């Protein structure tokens, strides 16, 4: 299936979920993340969900990270260059929703991409090889290029994997994808279990 068709399919599937289903599935995803052996790391990047796009609610995962006293990093998108700035989440971090509907930090201590140990990634769809489809702007592909090769890339999805997605040479595959029912492991990800 073409990427555009997959985007349409998964946007429709997500929009059909009730608010209660989103919360229940998001909690299941957060709990399943506890089964990964990733909790000895220091810097964790997490996305804040865009409510209008029915993304996985990462608040539950955020609470786990805070409870484990981890350094949590969130991003601000720059649509002029399709880049992202990463900021350490602190108690006094002011978060507002951008004109694109993205909850973002207004300011804060910037963290370089190559500092990040674990990155939780939003997506619309993924396949059995760890290829992912986002919204098509390439924010995360450019971001992941700047990260270390040993950074652990974890997608979060309400839905199971597609058999195969045609990927591009600039696409960076996931190490894991967490769904409510299953943990998908890709390439050398067994090193982390």
Image (tube, rainbow, N blue to C red):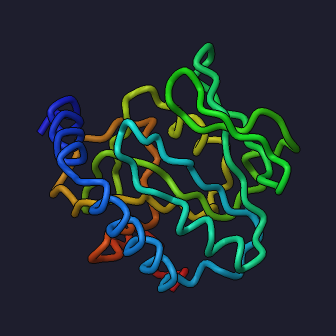
Q: How many marks?
A: 0
Q: Position of residue 64 (x, y in %)?
A: 61, 75
* Residue 99 vertical position relative to residue 101 in the rendered view, above or below: above
Q: Position of residue 42 (x, y in %)?
A: 77, 70
Q: Residue at x 49, y 47 (%)?
A: 49
Q: Residue at x 23, y 43 (%)?
A: 15
Give left or right: position of 160 versus 39.
Answer: left
In the picture, which quadrant includes the N terminus? top left
The one of 53 and 151 positioned closer to us in this rendering: 53
Q: Position of residue 78 (x, y in %)?
A: 64, 23
* Residue 60 vertical position relative to residue 112 in the rendered view, above or below: below
The one of 126 and 19 positioned closer to us in this rendering: 19
Give left or right: position of 90 versus 135.
Answer: right
Q: Residue at x 24, y 47 (%)?
A: 14
Q: Residue at x 57, y 34 (%)?
A: 142
Q: Position of residue 164 (x, y in %)?
A: 19, 52
Give left or right: position of 29 versus 143.
Answer: left
């Amino acid at each position: 299936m073409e990427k555009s068709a997959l985007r349409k399919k998964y946007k429709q599937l997500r929009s059909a979920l009730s608010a209660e289903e989103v919360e229940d599935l998001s909690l299941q995803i957060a709990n399943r993340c506890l089964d990964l052996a990733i909790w000895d790391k220091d810097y964790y990047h997490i996305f804040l969900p865009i409510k209008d796009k029915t993304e996985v609610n990462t608040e539950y995962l955020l609470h786990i990270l805070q409870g484990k006293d981890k350094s949590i990093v969130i991003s601000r998108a720059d649509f002029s260059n399709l880049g992202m700035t990463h900021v350490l989440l602190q108690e006094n971090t002011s978060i507002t929703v951008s004109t694109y509907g993205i909850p973002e930090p207004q300011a804060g201590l910037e963290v370089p991409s190559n500092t990040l140990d674990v990155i939780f990634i939003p997506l619309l769809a993924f396949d059995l090889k760890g290829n992912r489809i986002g919204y098509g702007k390439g924010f995360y592909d450019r971001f992941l290029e700047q990260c270390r090769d040993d950074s652990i890339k974890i997608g979060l999805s309400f839905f199971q994997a597609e058999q195969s997605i045609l990927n591009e040479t600039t696409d960076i595959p996931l190490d894991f994808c967490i769904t409510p029912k299953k943990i998908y492991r890709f390439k050398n990800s067994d090193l982390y279990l």
